[in-house]
């Protein structure tokens, strides 16, 4: 499906890539209106962002869904929501990408039922379900079940779609999120390839498809790649991906058809590098990153979605997303890029860098395979610790100035920006009333369905899950048609498969090495002096992730640096209720609580933690908060008792740890660490 003014492609000019905008918020109806507007602006594919309760298998009225409903995506709790999401959008003509993993089978089932209700032929449905659960244990954190059952859901969906929806890409192996979690280019290539091999091995060994179908399976495997601002290296990375994928599918799986072995990928350019300071610089960063995946014809992305300039500030507005779409359209339709063959064929520089990345990735792949493959490497904590260490090294290079970030650690003098003159209107606001409306709608849905049919469908799902040789898609489709909710589908499988908590990687990360020694030494001295003044062996810091936000990179880096500075760190990972955080703070007798929330749920979740601490008799315990928090929200949190609010502009982690020491001293000793004669600190 295209917009009404989609230009015709001149003869001799390549077809442009699919242009998407990652979008969805508040409610199915609100998101549907946004999708229609985006398509009218010339967007050529949809990219659905689901909210965290939908991604982690909870209904909107679950305790963990508080403050998270409709924040970072659209809430889809049942078939009625999926109908509303795509009302008036003919799915047979639309290429839809869905960023969904643990509940991917469920969302694809809902999508199929709605498409069939529209009269669509399954053979004509085109799109992609992310369905890469392995990287969720390493980065985004929206996993539910242990790796084994999760991989079963992945392979069941692949087997079903290859047979029934042949134009659907059932998995998008995501190196994107690995880079966001700190992966180097070599790690990004290697771990993505290890994931793809684990999936293909599981599909082959599960036996649901004949050996002759493996070519079709390989042909439907797509990748979702990141592209950072080092765009020459990033372009070579994609060429390395292409070479390795061709080699692996030919040698490991015996795929002889070159078309099946083609490396097919989409991309969202880097969000990790977007800055809150001088955010207008993010526009040129986005453009340079897009060039990495479009300049080289032989390694060009098949689909591109760009972040917005203000994503480090909050949720982008429709106008911000339009700006990113127009960037793509100008390159595709105004420039002459699509009139030429590959610009880099024969370049010795590109060939050498590509070969270097291939060699490094092959070495790391061998290391993971020696461990038994990617699943044992996840369960042992090896992959997570490697990513945490790489991210820590990157942050240290930024703090030391070795890596230059314009507007952050260099060229900081700036004129006032008209784009951020009014920070309250510079980002999209999600009305909290939407969460109440979604809950009310969910209650009505439950009351109007055939309860006996729902119970029967869930019984079948549980029974099929108990049988390891049964594909779960048929039972899932029956649940969708019966009116089962997202939370009920997930709960039934939780009963059979159990739940899982992935390793945090914090304990395995090495001590800081590249941070400025003088600053870290001063903070270490302040930590030790404060502990002595309080009469304790070590200061204790609780790092908590309330709600469903699984983006744990920031929390992990704080935990690692606090440990390096001499704190005893209590970090239990993601997905905790405010009550669990309060209980841990009291039980561990900590000196400070640090909360990390990047999903926008801070306005509801932080006050609940503060209230819980007061009720537990720990009202004097200092609480600091970090995340993507607009200025007005930060002021409101401080007014409610939060000692300090840190946002992406606070890139100096050692300075943040120093501020935490100050807050502990102010709470317990009434003087900051800067007044300690034994611990002089800058500023």
Image (cartoon, rainbow, N blue to C red):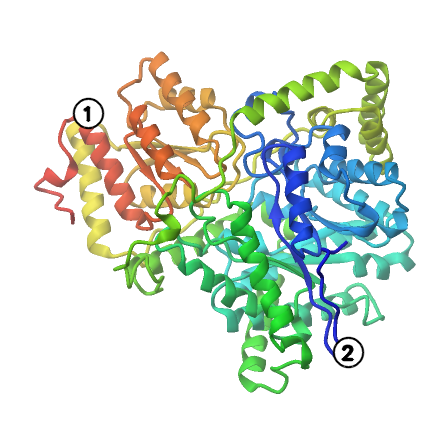
Can you tell which quarter of the image residue 133 is in? top right
Closer to the camera, 343 or 64? Answer: 343
| Residue found 51% across the figure and 51% down from its top | 320
Q: Nearer the viewer, residue 444 or 99?
A: 444
Q: Is residue 641 left or right of residue 231?
A: left
Q: Residue at x 81, y 17 (%)?
A: 449
Whole-percent x and y of residue 507? Answer: 43, 43
Query: Residue at left 36%, top 35%?
Result: 632
> How many neighbours does mark 2 have within 10 angstroms: few (below 14), some (14-19), or many (20 or more)?
few
- Circle 1 crowding by C-alpha within 10 Å: few under 14, some 14–19, many from 20: some
Residue under label 2 = 11
Give the image quarter of residue 41. bottom right
Real-space Cα separation, disc 1 to disc 2, in angstroms: 74 Å
Asked if residue 192 is positioned above or below residue 618 in the image, the reply reads below
> Residue 608: in sight, yes or no?
yes
Q: Is residue 536 left or right of residue 50?
A: left
Q: Which residue is mark 1?
A: 668
- Residue farthest to the front, as pictured: 5
């Amino acid at each position: 499906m295209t917009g009404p003014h989609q230009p015709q492609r001149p003869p001799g000019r390549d077809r442009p890539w699919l242009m998407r905008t990652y979008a969805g918020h508040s409610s199915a109806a609100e998101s549907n209106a946004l999708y229609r507007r985006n398509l009218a602006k010339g967007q050529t594919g949809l990219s659905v962002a689901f909210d965290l309760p939908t991604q982690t298998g909870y209904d909107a009225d679950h305790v963990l869904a508080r403050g998270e409903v409709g924040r970072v995506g659209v809430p889809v709790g049942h078939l009625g929501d999926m109908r509303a999401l795509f009302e008036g959008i003919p799915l047979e003509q639309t290429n839809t990408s869905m960023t969904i993993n643990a509940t991917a089978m469920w969302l694809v089932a809902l999508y199929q039922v709605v498409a069939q209700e529209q009269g669509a032929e399954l053979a004509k449905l085109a799109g992609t379900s992310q369905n890469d659960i392995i990287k969720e244990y390493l980065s985004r954190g929206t996993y539910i079940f242990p790796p084994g059952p999760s991989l079963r859901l992945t392979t069941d969906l692949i087997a079903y779609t290859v047979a029934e929806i042949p134009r659907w890409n059932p998995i998008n192996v995501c190196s994107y999120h690995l880079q966001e979690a700190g992966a180097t280019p070599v790690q990004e290539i290697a771990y993505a390839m290890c994931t793809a091999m684990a999936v293909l091995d599981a599909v082959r060994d599960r036996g649901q498809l004949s050996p002759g179908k493996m070519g079709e399976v390989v042909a439907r495997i797509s990748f979702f790649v990141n592209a950072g601002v080092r765009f020459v290296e990033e372009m070579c990375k994609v060429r390395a991906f292409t070479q390795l994928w061709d080699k692996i599918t030919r040698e490991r799986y015996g795929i002889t058809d070159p078309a099946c072995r083609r490396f097919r990928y989409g991309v969202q350019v880097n969000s990790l590098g977007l800055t809150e300071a001088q955010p207008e610089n993010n526009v040129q960063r986005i453009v340079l990153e897009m060039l990495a995946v479009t300049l080289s014809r032989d390694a060009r992305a098949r689909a591109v979605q760009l972040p917005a300039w203000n994503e480090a500030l909050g949720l982008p507005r429709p106008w911000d997303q339009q700006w990113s779409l127009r960037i793509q359209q100008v390159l595709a339709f105004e420039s002459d890029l699509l009139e030429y063959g590959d610009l880099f064929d024969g370049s010795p520089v590109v060939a050498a860098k590509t070969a270097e990345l291939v060699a490094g990735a092959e070495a790391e792949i061998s290391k993971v395979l020696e461990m038994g493959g990617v699943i044992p490497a996840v369960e042992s904590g090896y992959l997570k610790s490697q990513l945490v260490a790489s991210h820590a090294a990157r942050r240290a290079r930024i703090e030391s100035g070795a890596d230059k970030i314009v507007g952050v650690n260099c060229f900081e003098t700036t004129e006032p920006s008209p784009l951020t003159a009014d920070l309250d209107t510079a980002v999209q606001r999600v009305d909290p009333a939407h969460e109440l409306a979604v809950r009310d709608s969910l209650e009505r849905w439950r009351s109007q369905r055939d309860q006996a049919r729902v119970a029967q469908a869930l019984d079948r799902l549980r029974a099929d899950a108990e049988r390891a040789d049964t594909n779960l898609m048929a039972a899932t489709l029956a649940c969708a048609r019966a009116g089962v909710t997202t939370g009920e589908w997930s709960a039934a499988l939780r009963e059979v498969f159990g739940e899982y908590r992935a390793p945090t990687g914090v304990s395995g990360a090495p001590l800081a090495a590249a941070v400025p020694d003088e600053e870290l030494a001063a903070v270490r001295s302040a930590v030790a002096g404060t502990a002595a003044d309080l009469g304790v062996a070590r200061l204790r810091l609780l790092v908590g992730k309330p709600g469903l936000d699984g983006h744990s990179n920031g929390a992990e880096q704080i935990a690692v640096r606090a440990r390096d500075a001499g704190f005893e760190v209590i970090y239990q990972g993601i997905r905790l209720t405010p009550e669990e955080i309060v209980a841990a703070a009291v039980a561990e007798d900590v000196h400070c609580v640090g909360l990390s929330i990047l999903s926008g749920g801070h306005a509801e979740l932080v006050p609940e933690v503060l209230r819980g601490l007061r009720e537990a008799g720990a009202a004097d315990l200092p609480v600091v908060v970090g995340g993507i928090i607009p200025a007005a929200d930060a002021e409101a949190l401080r007014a409610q008792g939060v000692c300090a609010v840190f946002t992406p502009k606070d890139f100096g982690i050692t300075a943040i740890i120093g501020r935490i020491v100050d807050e502990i001293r102010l709470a317990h000793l009434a003087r900051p660490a800067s007044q300690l004669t034994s611990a002089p600190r800058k500023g």
